[in-house]
Image: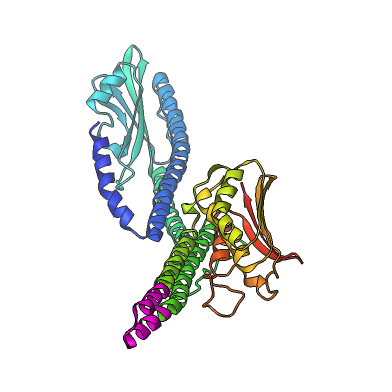
Amino acid sequence: MSRRPGRLRTWFRLRPWFRRLPVVARLVLAVAVTMSLVLTGTAGLVYWRVQTALDRQLNDDLTTYRRSLDRAVRTGQELPPGPSGSLQQVLDAQGRILVSSAALRARSLLTAAELGAAVHGATVRRDVGSLLPITSDTLRLQAARVTVGGQDRIVVAAVRRGHRDEALRELLAQLALASGLTLIAASYVGYRTARAALRPVERYRAGAAGLADGAQHLRLDVPADRDDEITRLGHTLNHMLDRLAASAERERRFVADASHELRTPLTLIRAELDVALHRPRSAGELTETLRSVDTEVQRLIDLSNALLDLEELGTTQHLSRAPADLTALVHTAVAPHLRTAERAGRAVTVAAAPATVDVDARWLRPAIANLLDNALRHGSGPVGVTATVHGGGLRLCVTDEGSGFPPEFLPRAFDRFARAEASRTGAGSGLGLAFVQAVATAHGGTAHAENTGRGARVVLALPC
């Protein structure tokens, strides 16, 4: 139980160090460790199989030799010679050497404990010397009891293990060399593979660094004929870069549009004040000047609110869909403009289907109001507002019987600050239709304008 907590403590100490390594180094280290374990297991299996085969052959030769000695002792014959380099010895029950090979020089091959075990009928097997480090006179012996004329004799047969040990040492050297070379090759291949796999990641990082340094219109070079994890990462990063570029473009356009459009009312305000301060004015003239300034200030407020609404609609995160009664929604949006239409002597007809739609009424209501205001401001004749639901889609349509849109204006009708007239001092900010399209886009729908031959039509199509 004490070893496992020690290993866990070592692992917890090494894990922070491992995590601080570069990804390539971690991959190569993981490959090296894994290959080391695989090669060690494979080498161990090969060594065990070869050792088992050599030991089986050696034991068979030794058993055959000892049995031949047993028969010779029982029959009183001369002890037969064994395999090359083999040794033999016959002991009595007290351990006295009766017969021995000349190379042993009266040295007993058995210890006292082994002699006692053999006297009691056990077959003794033992190796003399070790494989590593290399020692001389390595033997494998086998001893067993033989009864001759009522007396016990211990017959000991021994064969040299030199060839067997030399073969195993040679096998160990070859396995170590092969494993080392395989480990080096696997580590090199793992390193090259990791570098090749992470090269696109480094390229993506360099591209992102270029974006951080202010590069414009940056896109990563992602292969189109692949579909692996790194390629999908590249596509995801490109999508993110597109979103960032769109956000930056939206911000730049917001600043440019705001500065461009705010310049005119601010210039007018400054001109009115300069004229009023140039010489003494009557109370009536000052009142007229203040009314003019108030009109321009209100224009600035409306313009600022419109720009902020457009910016807020630039992301669907500000959209909160909820079930809404379509008829009530349309009538609520149209109601504030009925008095204006009545004063202009124009009729407004509303046809809304009795249905429940899943939309953000907070944004859709002013979009309908903008379309109606645009028709009353720039069109003529009666204005029709229709709302229908079909196939899970909402279709809002506002028509008038005026002269319609100028043909050259239609392609840019929904652009910010786009106006049919060239002057920017007229009524309106040029943001009404841009707001309508932003509402449609935020809902996942579309908006388009067209001429009908009898006037203009603007259609808002939303999924609901």
Colour setting: rainbow
Q: Return the x and y of residue 378 as percentages of the image width and height.
A: 62, 68
Q: How many marks?
A: 0
Position of 76 relative to 254 (above/below): above
**Residue at the farthest top position:** 150
In the image, the segment drawn in magenta is 268-293
| Quarter containing the N terminus | top left
Residue 140 placement: quadrant: top left
**Residue at the farthest right position:** 453
Residue 8 colored in magenta in the image: no
Q: Is residue 143 visible?
A: yes
Q: Return the x and y of residue 280 as percentages of the image width and height.
A: 31, 85
Majority SS type along the magenta span: helix
Does residue 212 appear left or right of residue 372 in this picture?
A: left
Q: Is residue 224 visible?
A: no
> For this rendering, which residue is in front, 32 or 140?
32
Q: Return the x and y of residue 459 as percentages of the image width and height.
A: 66, 58
Q: Return the x and y of residue 414 as percentages of the image width and height.
A: 60, 67
Position of 292 relative to 152 (above/below): below
Residue occupying the point 44% across, 61% down: 191
Does residue 284 appear left or right of residue 445 in this picture?
A: left
Does residue 185 appear left or right of residue 121 in this picture?
A: right
Position of 325 relative to 341 (above/below): above
> For this rendering, which residue is in front, 251 or 70?
251
Residue 275 colored in magenta in the image: yes
> For this rendering, which residue is in front, 53 or 69?
53
> For this rendering, which residue is in front, 460 or 220?
460
Residue occupying the point 38% across, 79% down: 285
